[in-house]
Image (tube, grey):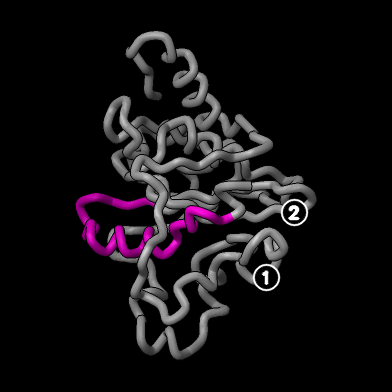
């Protein structure tokens, strides 16, 4: 597990690492701030690039995209027109795989770049743990996206959030937000195996799931 040697916040980071390792660390509210300033994005992979996000305060927690279960079921509501025009949008990029794990995950993570908000990678899977039992996850795999739950008043959504530009503690909080009381009986994680992945394709994939800067999930 990662240990932080940069002064006073080391205990905080070590605790977060343990929380992920054991599957602990539930949070009531999730604050997501990416390294780059949140700005409106232009996407070209879909004829209706924002349909996967609820609209406004009244629409939060409603519609077919309110709860992310897995990639295929999430993409199912898109029209055949999009499938014909953008076939690459409906499959995971090469070098990327998705796994749903119950907690405790049995994974030890470390920062991709020490002290910088550049995501996390796998350092170890606990023998006999849920990650090891999946047979998919290997040390060195990079976590590129993970489900997170955000509760707003009496409604909530579970979204797949890109996490390659998030801080370690924010990612641990996202993992911890997947709680049974919100219908989240597992945590869905997408990993990249760097040797098999095309960075450009990975970026396009993550841009599709990027939450608009003014969405309730970020500002609520």
Q: Are marks 1 and 2 in contact (CB under 8 Å)?
A: no
The residue beneath circle 1 is 63
Residue 15 locus on image (x, y percent): 51, 20
Residue for point 55% across, 39% down: 31
Residue 22 in the figure: left or right of residue 82: right
Q: Position of residue 154 (x, y in %)?
A: 79, 51
What segment is highlighted magenta in the picture?
Answer: 191-215
Residue ID at (68%, 59%): 57
- Which quadrant is home to the N terminus? top left
17 vs 115, nearest the viewer: 115
Residue 63 in percent (x, y) is at 67, 70
In the image, 110 versus 153, the foreground residue is 153
**Which of pointers 1 and 2 lies earlier in the amino acid sequence?**
1
The residue to which callout 2 is attached is 155
Q: Residue at x 36, y 81 (%)?
A: 87
Instruction: Report helix, strand or loop for mark 2.
Output: strand
Q: Is residue 133 magenta?
A: no
Residue 57, above or below 15 = below
Task: Classify mark 1: helix, strand or loop.
Answer: loop
Residue 197 within the segment the image draws in magenta: yes
Disc 2 crowd rating (10 Å Cα; few below 14, some 14-19, many 20+) is few
In terms of image quadrants, where is residue 41? bottom left
Q: Is residue 136 visible?
A: no
Residue 29: mark? none
Q: Nearer the viewer, residue 151 or 182?
A: 151
| Percent coordinates x, y for residue 35 in the rendering | 36, 40
Badge 1 density bin: few <14, some 14–19, many ≥20, Cα 10 Å: few
Label 1 and label 2: CA atoms lie apart by: 12 Å
Residue 206 vertical position relative to residue 63 in the rendered view, above or below: above
């Amino acid at each position: 597990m990662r240990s932080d040697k940069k002064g006073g916040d080391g205990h905080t980071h070590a605790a977060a690492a343990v929380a992920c390792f054991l599957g602990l660390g539930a949070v009531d509210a999730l604050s997501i701030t990416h390294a780059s300033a949140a700005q409106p994005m232009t996407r070209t992979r879909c004829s209706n690039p924002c349909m996967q996000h609820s609209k406004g305060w009244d629409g939060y927690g409603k519609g077919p995209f309110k709860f992310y279960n897995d990639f295929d079921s999430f993409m199912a509501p898109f029209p055949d027109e999009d499938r014909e025009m953008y076939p690459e949008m409906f499959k995971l990029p090469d070098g990327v795989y998705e796994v749903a794990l119950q907690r405790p995950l049995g994974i030890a993570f470390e920062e991709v770049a020490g002290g910088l908000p550049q995501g996390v990678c796998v350092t170890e899977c606990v023998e006999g743990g849920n990650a090891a039992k999946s047979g998919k996850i290997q040390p060195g795999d990079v976590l590129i996206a993970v489900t997170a739950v955000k509760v707003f008043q009496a409604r909530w959504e579970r979204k797949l959030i890109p996490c390659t530009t998030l801080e370690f503690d924010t990612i641990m909080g996202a993992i911890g937000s997947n709680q049974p009381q919100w219908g989240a009986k597992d945590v869905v994680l997408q990993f990249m195996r760097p040797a098999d992945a095309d960075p450009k394709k990975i970026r396009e994939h993550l841009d599709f799931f990027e939450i608009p800067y003014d969405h309730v999930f970020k500002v609520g």
